Each structure stands twice: as structure tokens, then as C-alpha cells.
Amino acid sequence: MEVVQIEAKSRELFGKKHTKALRKEGLIPAIVYGGGDVTTISLTARAVKPIVYTPNFKVAVINVGGQKLKCILKEIIFHPVTDEIVHIDFLKLIDGTPVKVEIPVSFKGKSPGVKEGGKLIPQLRKVKVKTLPEKMVDVLYVDISELDLGGSVRVKDLEVPEGMEVMVTPAMPVAIVEVPRALKSEAAEAADEDETLDAAAPTEEAAAE
């Protein structure tokens, strides 16, 4: 599990005026909640860049005046025009307390369908799960070594660690192997030729006459 260390400052002033002043200083207002506690903080965009602008699942350890809070990113609000980060919510991880998180999906093995010219099309890049912090993983794998042309792997095929509950329908596709047009055309032409040959071949009764 990749961990990102983040330095933050505690903030005790609230309201639009204060948050506006923070943003002018290049700081982002944020909160850390969980276990009945709420800690209000401010941090820089640079400090959160490794955990915000990535498709990977990471855990943050936020250092607030010497107190280290182990968290996950829960919600980010971006400015609708500038796309700058306006506010961040972190959820504090507490051992023994389950949390719901979205874990990225990755593939292992080589698909026979891809070797034959098909294209692997991901359908689900992240899966929502419920798990204890101590059982958390940064990726869920699915084996595609038996995935043929036109075939699919589904949520039920994911390799899920013991004690982790998947919150997504088991039948939902995770990836498919798309049959390319060239192969479809070849198959269609072959089928047409077979039909033509069958039509041209004399029946047993006609041959007997």
C-alpha cells in the first residue's frame, strides 16, 4: 500500500471570509473526520498533488502539529471555472472499523482473444468495496488468461482478499475482448461461402434421380 506524507496546519477560524483569505495565500481548507472527531486543517495544492492527481489508490498520513492522522481521500471540490481545488474531505482510518473505498482494477495474464487480434476493453476501472483498514489493498486483480474473442470477465471473477466485501453486482462486466471488424468480416465472408456451397450442393434425392 502506497502512503503519501502530507504536512498540514490546524485552522480555528471558519466562514467564507476566512476560507477566501486562505485561498489567497495558496492554501486549501480541508477537514479530517472519523471516529466521532473532526479536525479542520489547511494545506497546499502541492502537498496533495500525489494523492489527488493519480488513478492509483493511496493512503495519506497527515501531519498536523505533530499529530499524524492516517486517512483516505473522500471528497474533493473543484472550482467550476479555474478547476482549482476548493475543499477536501479526508476520512480517518481506524483499525477495526470498516470503511467503503473504491479500489482500482488491474489485469494479469495474457488473453488468447487479444493474441488472435482482439482488443481488451476495460468496462470497470474501480470497484467499490467494504473492508477493514488493516485488510486494505491498493489494487484488485482479475485473471484474463482464458479470455477469448468476444468473451468477458466480471466482478465475480475478481481476486478478492478474505474479509473484503464487494459492493458491486457480481455479474457486472470488468472487461471484454472486442472482435475487430476485419475478423468479423472474415467470419461473415466464410459463413456466406458455406451457405453458397450448401445451396449449390445437390441433395441426395436429386442425385438419385
Image (cartoon, rainbow, N blue to C red):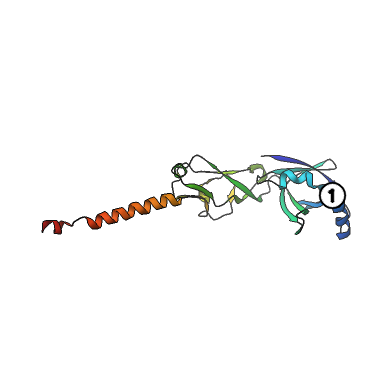
Mark 1: which secondary structure?
A: loop
The answer to which image quadrant residue 56 occupies is top right
Residue at 76%, 59% (x, y): give it: 81
Query: How many marks overall?
Result: 1
Q: Is residue 38 among the parts visible in the rendering?
A: no
Q: Which residue in the rendered view is the most extreme toward the left?
A: 209
75 with respect to 153 (left or right): right
44 with respect to 100 (left or right): right
Nearest the eye: 129 or 49: 49
Residue at 49%, 40% (x, y): give it: 110
Q: Where is residue 43 in the image (x, y as percent from the top left)?
A: 82, 47
Q: In the image, is residue 19 above or below residue 145?
A: below
Residue at 14%, 59% (x, y): give it: 206
Q: Residues within 10 Å of mark 1 (few under 14, many from 20)?
A: few
Which quadrant does the C terminus fall into?
Answer: bottom left
Nearest the eye: 43 or 95: 43
Q: Position of residue 61 (x, y in %)?
A: 75, 42
Q: Name the residue under label 1.
A: 26
Q: In the image, is residue 149 above or below residue 206?
A: above
Nearest the eye: 179 or 27: 179
Q: Is residue 191 among the parts visible in the rendering?
A: yes
Q: Position of residue 208 (x, y in %)?
A: 11, 57
Amino acid residing under circle 1 = Gly
Residue at 51%, 47% (x, y): give it: 120
The answer to which image quadrant residue 57 occupies is top right
Q: Where is residue 77 in the image (x, y as percent from the top left)?
A: 75, 56
The answer to which image quadrant residue 192 occupies is bottom left
